[in-house]
């Protein structure tokens, strides 16, 4: 029997190796990071097993439903299960990237690079540290790409159905639905695409109704757009982040894909895939810019999270397209101009960034933020220079550009994992008093004046079957029951109250509130 070359064995083993590494990370990570959405997704998982349903939950249920089979586990265990699901999805993306490149007959060098990028890029690798749905969205994008990119048979109906289901993962994923409808019509697969998309949207609507996760409150809030920085600045920041994390390849890929929109003659499967990804990425850029407007955090002017799911799919699809022909210098020049303009806009608007950057939101470019010690203007300039160097290398030194991309991605991944590990350890020490709450308790209150806003979400994961309310003890509001999470001095002057325990990594703890109220 003919022995397979070692490189083929290595490529086939890459998805399994990536999954194994991510599983080890997930199993040793620790508590949820201090952001509400992680606990909110897990609430969907836990309510399937009798957990208290938070009314009008402002997060879509898709990821929570995927983790649903593990909802019977305890607080920390269900979070670990969610990370393990993301670990499996991360390994799956490696296989899907390889499959897509096989469809497009990519050269061996491109296959090696695509595999390495899928294994190392922080847009995917952070999933084993944060129970977010972004990795699941990457899988959806790659699934659609595989369905419409297969050379012999394109399954537009199934692709449309998946795109219709995308908003159940995240409301902004509606851009995926719109993109597949447009590209399906341009590709003359109107009927199958519309029917498939309609079926997916119906399932999405029913799911949102059953889980009470309609985004009415968010939709109303989105109509009141923030003043400074405006959507132009936040959009420019997203574009700059997307371009930098792909060392220029993503920007040229999106612009190349958009040029295929007006092509009248028949497009190849890889061109169809690229224009779908480019159009949906552009849609996310616009929607994300609107959502981020008005934030005082500096990371919103170099924000990568919303467009991160497109990073690997766009880059790989673009490399497959240019394997036979390099894009025109006109497109590369246009991409460079957009990056320079984005830099100028964000630098001018940087004076409105008065708060500190959140490390969890800087994953895709973590190395830049660390090197510049989070000085926003300097970070923007370094990002612009890195993108411009990538544009130059695209035509003359493509291999050097690809190596640079992997280097930036690898270092950012290491730094991001180190940061998120610390955050998880802190979270572990901010919800330990949950075990002191008696099983008979049906409602636990949280004092907003002496705890952090995210604290209530940490306790919700630990105590999913009881109601949690947020009150203001300083304003005279009383707890919903006998117990309340509050600062260690919050009820010192309350006669009959008892402080049962302080959190080791926080300034709050569990109080027993007197039945006859204070005084």
Image: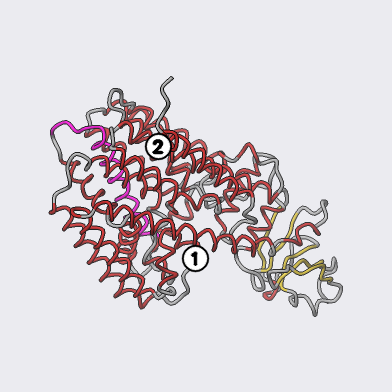
Q: Which residue lies at the image location 36% right of the left edge and 50% below the top edge?
A: 311
SS of the residue at dot 2? helix
Image quarter of residue 441: bottom right
Residue 372 versus residue 118 in the image, above or below: below
Sequence order check, earlier mark of 2 and 1: 2
Q: Position of residue 127 (x, y in %)?
A: 51, 50
Q: Quadrant of the C terminus?
A: bottom right
- The residue closer to the viewer here, 81 or 113, is 113
Q: Which residue lies at the image location 46% right of the left edge and 70% below the top edge?
A: 357
Q: Which residue lies at the image location 74% right of the left edge and 61% below the top edge?
A: 432
SS of the residue at dot 1? helix
- The residue closer to the viewer here, 295 or 333, is 333
Badge 1 is on which residue?
A: 359
> What's drawn in magenta, residue-wise?
265-291
Instruction: Name the image colouring.
Output: secondary structure
Q: Quadrant of the N terminus?
A: top left
Q: Position of residue 137 (x, y in %)?
A: 44, 44
Q: Which residue lies at the image location 85% right of the left edge and 76% below the top edge?
A: 495
Q: Position of residue 3 (x, y in %)?
A: 42, 26
Residue 398 versus residue 380 in the image, above or below: above
Is residue 21 found inside the magenta-colored segment of the image? no
**Category of crowding for the residue at label 1, using alpha-carbon neighbours closer than 10 angstroms: few (below 14), some (14–19), many (at least 20):** some
**Category of crowding for the residue at label 2, using alpha-carbon neighbours closer than 10 angstroms: few (below 14), some (14–19), many (at least 20):** few
Instruction: Compute the Cα span from label 2 to label 1.
Output: 37 Å
Q: Please give left or right for residue 207 compared with residue 186 in the image.
A: right
Farthest top residue? 1
The numbered disc on residue 7 is 2
Q: Position of residue 498 (x, y in %)?
A: 84, 71
* Predominant SS of the magenta segment: helix
Image quarter of residue 497: bottom right
């Amino acid at each position: 029997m003919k022995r397979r070359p070692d490189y083929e064995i290595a490529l086939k083993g890459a998805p399994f190796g990536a999954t194994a590494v991510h599983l080890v990370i997930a199993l040793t990570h620790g508590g949820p990071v201090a952001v509400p959405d992680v606990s909110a997704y897990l609430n969907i998982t836990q309510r399937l097993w009798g957990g208290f349903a938070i009314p009008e939950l402002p997060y879509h249920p898709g990821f929570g439903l995927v983790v649903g089979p593990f909802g019977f586990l305890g607080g920390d265990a269900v979070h670990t299960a969610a990370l393990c699901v993301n670990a499996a999805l991360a390994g799956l993306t490696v296989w899907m990237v390889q499959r897509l490149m096989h469809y497009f007959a990519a050269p061996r060098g491109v296959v090696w690079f695509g595999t390495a990028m899928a294994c190392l890029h922080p847009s995917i690798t952070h999933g084993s540290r944060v129970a977010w749905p972004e990795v699941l969205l990457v899988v959806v994008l790659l699934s659609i790409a595989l369905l419409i990119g297969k050379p012999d048979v394109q399954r537009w109906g199934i692709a449309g159905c998946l795109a219709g289901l995308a908003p159940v993962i995240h409301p902004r994923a509606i851009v995926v639905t719109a993109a597949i409808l447009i590209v399906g019509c341009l590709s003359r697969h109107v009927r199958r695409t519309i029917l498939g998309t309609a079926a997916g949207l119906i399932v999405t609507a029913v799911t949102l109704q059953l889980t009470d996760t309609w985004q009415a409150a968010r939709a109303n809030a989105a109509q009141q757009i923030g003043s400074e920085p405006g959507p132009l600045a936040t959009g420019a920041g997203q574009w700059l982040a997307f371009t930098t994390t792909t060392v220029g390849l993503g920007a040229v890929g999106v612009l190349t894909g958009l040029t295929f929109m007006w092509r009248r003659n028949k497009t190849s499967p890889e061109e169809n895939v690229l224009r779908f990804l480019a159009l949906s990425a552009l849609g996310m850029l616009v929607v994300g810019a609107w959502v981020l407007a008005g934030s005082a955090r500096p990371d919103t002017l170099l924000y990568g999270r919303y467009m991160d799911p497109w990073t690997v799919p766009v880059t790989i699809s673009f490399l497959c397209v240019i394997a036979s022909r390099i894009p025109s210098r006109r497109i590369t020049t246009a991409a460079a101009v957009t990056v320079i303009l984005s830099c100028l806009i964000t630098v001018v608007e940087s004076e409105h960034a008065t708060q500190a950057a959140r490390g969890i939101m800087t994953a895709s470019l973590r190395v830049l933020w660390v090197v510049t010690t989070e000085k926003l203007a300097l970070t923007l300039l370094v990002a612009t220079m890195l993108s411009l160097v990538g544009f130059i290398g695209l035509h003359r030194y493509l291999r050097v550009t690809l190596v640079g991309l992997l280097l930036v991605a690898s270092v950012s991944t290491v730094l991001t994992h180190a940061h998120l590990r610390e955050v998880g350890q802190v979270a572990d020490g901010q919800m330990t008093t949950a075990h002191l709450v008696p099983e008979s308790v049906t409602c636990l209150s949280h004092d907003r004046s002496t705890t952090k806003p995210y604290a209530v979400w940490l306790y919700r994961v630990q105590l999913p079957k009881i109601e949690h309310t947020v009150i203001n003890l300083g304003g005279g509001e009383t707890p919903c029951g006998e117990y309340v999470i509050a600062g260690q001095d919050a009820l010192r002057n309350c006669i009959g109250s008892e402080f049962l325990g302080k959190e080791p990594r926080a300034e709050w703890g569990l109080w027993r509130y007197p039945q006859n109220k204070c005084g």
